[in-house]
Amino acid sequence: MPTPFVVTVDTEEEWDWASGYPTGPTRTTNISRLPAFQDACEKHAAAVTYFVNHAVLADDASAEIICALAARPRVEIGMHVHPWNTPPLQAAERVPVRDSFIHNLPPELALAKLNAVYDAFAARGLKPITFRGGRYSTSALVQQWLRERGFVADASILPYTSWTDDGAPNYAHRAPEPVRTASGLWELPLSLGFTRGPFGFWKRALSVASVVPKLVGALSKFGVAERAWLNFENPLGERMPHLIRALLKRNVPYLCFTLHSSSLLPGGSPYAPNEAAVSAMFARLNNVLARCAADSALEPATVAEIASRLESQQNARHRDQPAG
């Protein structure tokens, strides 16, 4: 069967990322750029999952755009949460870095924020069944809440990645393959890895080489291996074709591309300082999606459709197992 691929968009407000994590008010000007972005994806018949947060749904004009997108073919609207500006709000003007990750919040507060976003979806006539935590944060508590509401996938995991921020998640030892939790929820990591395999070896080798920056550069220059991400806005995404080949050779069951909606607006994110940067990102997106559309080994699917396929394959394997 062809390998499914999906474009995911963290659909959120724009703000100065260097300013910390403000509790509000929010600006969602970037959402007006989503229809043109969707047109670009439709040109290549790509499926898109928009992970939408509370700030977007709380704004009538932005929510109207999201609802219009939901009616388009090959579009799914998933759920996203920014704990710092999702009700109930903390009294401070900005939250500590640690509190920008939902897994660090007291359980009652985390659940209240999840409910606030979910209720905002319901108020707009939307019912999400896939999730991505803000700043790639999730937890057993979050996943239990998701399953109780019929969610099928948590797409918060970023493989081979850790951060120095206080309380940040640590996915340094997670591979790009999906994992089905005991509750039946599929953890679907984003597609980040290395331009050649075996991934485990190159993860260790590049980690050792990182203490000598010139060595990492040499490994890249001579095409040995480097870390890469299916991300249209990130410098790591410049090696996407090489990573796609390595992932398919590894027989991963799907490819997950990503970007932030704020990167569609000049000045909306660090990845989009000006119109030229946005144009370059669109050029990269068109180039990569054109290649995917022309590759018979790939086919478009939303995050929910990927989870459904994985669930069907899991059930088929169980049926085929001999009794006893």
Image: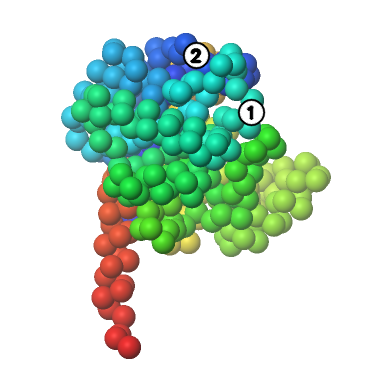
* SS state under label 1: helix
Q: Is residue 277 visible?
A: no
Which residue lies at the image location 30% right of the left edge and 85% below the top edge? 322
- What residue do we see at 50% from left, 43% from top? 138
For disc 2, the neighbor class at 10 Å (few under 14, some 14 to 19, many from 20) is: few
Say if residue 211 shows up in the picture: yes
* Mark earlier in primary sequence (1, 2): 2
Q: Quadrant of the N terminus?
A: bottom left
Residue 268 shown left or right of residue 55 in the figure: right
Q: Residues within 10 Å of mark 1 (few under 14, many from 20)?
A: some
- Report the front residue among 188 and 194: 188
The spot of residue 153 in percent (x, y) is 37, 48
Above/below status of 93 relative to 226: above
Q: Which residue is mark 2?
A: 24
Q: Position of residue 174 (x, y in %)?
A: 56, 54
Residue 7 as seen in the image, left or right of residue 160 = left
User: Residue 16 is drawn in which quadrant?
Assistant: top right
- Report how many numbered discs are placed on residues in the image: 2
* Residue that extends furthest to the front in the rendered view of this protein: 108
176 and 106: which is toward the camera: 106
In the rendered image, which residue does mark 1 sit on? 97
Q: Indicate the amino acid at tag 2.
A: Gly
Residue lying farthest to the bottom in this orientation = 324
Q: Which residue occupies 47% across, 11% down?
A: 25
Snapshot quadrant of residue 324: bottom left
Is residue 37 shown above or below 289? above
Cα distance between the residues tagged 1 and 2: 16 Å
In percent of the image, x 40 and y 15: which residue is there?
28
- Residue 157 horizontal/vertical position (percent): 50, 46
What's the amino acid at mark 1?
Answer: Val
